[in-house]
Amino acid sequence: MGSLTDGAIRRAIKDVESTGKQKSLPDGEGRGVGRLVLVLRRMPKRVLAEWMAQQWRDGRRIKAKLGDYPSMSLAEAREVFKRDYAGPIQKGRSIKIATDTRPGTVADLFEAYAAALKEAGKPSWKETEKGLNKVADLLGRHRPAREIEPDEVTEVLRPIFERGVRSMADHVRSYIRAAYSWGMKSEHDYRNASPRRFRLVYNPAAGIPTEPKVVGTRWLDESEFVQLWRWLECPDTPVHPPYLRAVQILMLTGQRVEEIARLHRDQWDSAERILDWSKTKNSRPHAVPVPSLAAEMLDSIKPNEHGWLFPSAMDPSKPVRHSTLYSFIWRQRERGVIPVVTNRDLRRTWKTLAGKAGLSKEIRDRIQNHALQDVSSKSYDRWNYMPEKRAGMARWDRFVRAMLSKKSGRKRTAEAA
């Protein structure tokens, strides 16, 4: 049989409509191997026309749907069949596992990477998705991802750098590099559900230098700790109350900013005085007892209707963003009402002052959920260290209460004088 024509298809549709008999219209030869077929079936209100790739394999006929006619024209069906199915048929591969062979676009790559982060439960997926969406517009979201050159990535980063936002430029670079790295690894990953293959041969962001990492050293001494605590207790300017309490819990527990910011009522066990996260930054579950001062504060907080302990001021259905807490602290620093500090410095402060309180480094590491890299900790030790962490937090609680009492006592003495 020769090649199909649109006229032959229209006549066949009318014939099926009148007779009610199913009909298959092959396009060209190819008997014994495989070919493109239009299958016509009468439905109650119309004739359904479906493009099928048809293959004879191991004595059986196999079909895979390409699309519907006339939504997919004859020319488009031929193009898709030639592109995605002719090769596998000639090589004797099953068309059931044939996929779209077009290289994925920049948008395909970035969207699939963000989806992979979301599926893995990474809290950074939303921020990453937002950043990459802007980058896709600059690089050309419909261009094949494999065509992007290093100098194009550089031209995206340079304006950000020249505006003086060096950390943002480095974050964008890391987003692009991570997305391409994921794309290269996902090419043959059977666990990857992305419908696209990207055919990447290199990572265009791999050779772009990073900003030198500045290792923070700032921590609050006892007097600065008390100064910040007293301001949070009685701020001199209107502040969304959950922001104040979130920073205080950071100071008392030494946990990660993102994890405290997103605290939900399901994560606070009041009876056991434990904060419990099923997944954290290092992908490990983490449960930490809190000092009694923090427990009293957490018990006094009434979660909102969505369950958040620290809801956003702009959208109560969401928790406060960790970047919002950073901005809040920076604004007060600029006003000179609190010590110069960042939220990460508060985690460092807890580490340092808890050491002064007498907690061993191992217990401090476990309380802060820092990954222990020795073979014993990684592969064998499955003890949860809860009794040891409770004892450490009790000691830290006594230290903090004495510190606040001593400093406030001095202040009252000075005021009386």
Image (spheres, rainbow, N blue to C red):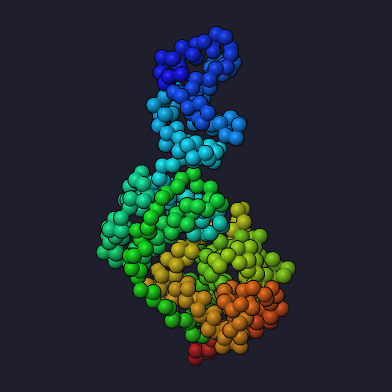
Query: Furthest-right residue in view?
Result: 271
Q: Is residue 314 visible?
A: no
| Residue shown at the point (70%, 75%) measured from the top left | 383
Q: Is 326 in front, or is 65?
A: 65
In the image, is 170 to the left or to the right of 99? Answer: left
For this view, does 69 lie left or right of residue 391?
Answer: left
Residue at x-position 52% and y-position 39% = 92
Residue at the location (67% across, 75% down)? 380
Is residue 183 visible to the viewer in this orientation of the structure? yes
Closer-to-camera residue (14/165): 14
Give whichever of 311, 91 is nearer the camera. 91
**Residue drawn at x 44%, y 23% as measured from the top left:** 28
Considering only vertical position in the picture, is 297 above or below 6? Answer: below
Residue 252: percent from left, percent from top:
58, 76
Residue 73 screen position, x and y as percent = 41, 25
Number of numbered discs: 0
Front residue of 361/346: it is 361
Q: Where residue 11 sits in the image (x, y, percent)?
A: 46, 12
